[in-house]
Image (cartoon, rainbow, N blue to C red):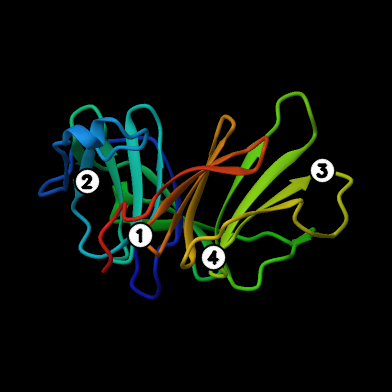
Amino acid sequence: MGKSSLVLVLVFQGRDQLSLDGGVISSVSMGKSSRQASLQCVSVAEGHSKAVLSVDCTNELLFTGSKDRTCKVWNLVTGQEIISSLVFTVSSSFIKVWDIRDSAKCIRTLTFSCTGKLSGHQGPVMCLTVDQKPGTNQDLVVTGSKDHYVKLFEVTPASPSSLSPSHTLDPPHYDGIESVLVQGDRVYSGSRDTGLKVWHLPSKELLQQVPSAHRAG
């Protein structure tokens, strides 16, 4: 995928044959106390040689981007690493489209113009996700930053060119935020402090936290 900088965000389309010498998803045994927790580690995907910086998934596929400068696709049914025909990566200041059927050839570089700015963080924004509210013209943008905070922005076509957050989720993480996800009325955040937090979107309250969901390093 190139060796100039790290892969930070990715989205995949399509899938192809099983890759040779690929990674594998292994089940994790749980103790009695783990079964009672609402957040449980049930499997571990092993195959990247360095830290994983971004993940996404469908019902059958898991997508990962890593500091090892590779993007991987995993079949959640078979537990095997697979490859896809098209890969979208964001690295440095560019969005690139790759066709890995032709020796990972970059077939297009996407460029866009800025129409507005979401401001309010005191550190670099490391991740974001957008949740479209059904039946409205409003998008909820959730951002995570190196300032340890998760912020919410309500964006409409009539929003000003510079928009402040509608809410800041508190208490913050102990280190920078690396991933955020909206699922129904829940917001999930993952941090470099190795912890996970679950937030109730309507009330903006913290529902649960797992302080050491991953090993540091």
**Residue ID for mark 3:** 156
Spot occupied by residue 216 in the image (x, y as percentages of width and height): 28, 65
- For disc 1, the neighbor class at 10 Å (few under 14, some 14 to 19, many from 20) is many
**Residue ID for mark 4:** 148
- The three-letter code of the residue at mark 2 reads Ala
Label 3 with label 1: CB-CB less than 8 Å: no
- Distance in Å between CA atoms under marks 2 and 3: 38 Å
- The three-letter code of the residue at mark 3 reads Thr
**Residue ID for mark 2:** 45
Relative placement, left or right, of 40 versus 142 is: left
Relative placement, left or right, of 114 versus 59 is: right
- Distance in Å between CA atoms under marks 3 and 1: 34 Å
Label 2 with label 3: CB-CB less than 8 Å: no
The secondary element bearing badge 3 is classed as loop
- The three-letter code of the residue at mark 4 reads His
Look at 89% across and 46% down and name the residue there: 158
- Disc on res. 194: 1
Spot occupied by residue 64 in the image (x, y as percentages of width and height): 34, 50
Q: Earlier in the sequence, mark 4 or mark 1?
A: 4
- Distance in Å between CA atoms under marks 1 and 2: 17 Å
Image quadrant containing the C terminus: bottom left
Q: Earlier in the sequence, mark 2 or mark 4?
A: 2
- The three-letter code of the residue at mark 1 reads Thr
- Whether 134 is drawn above or below 200: the answer is above
- Distance in Å between CA atoms under marks 2 and 4: 26 Å
Q: Earlier in the sequence, mark 3 or mark 1?
A: 3
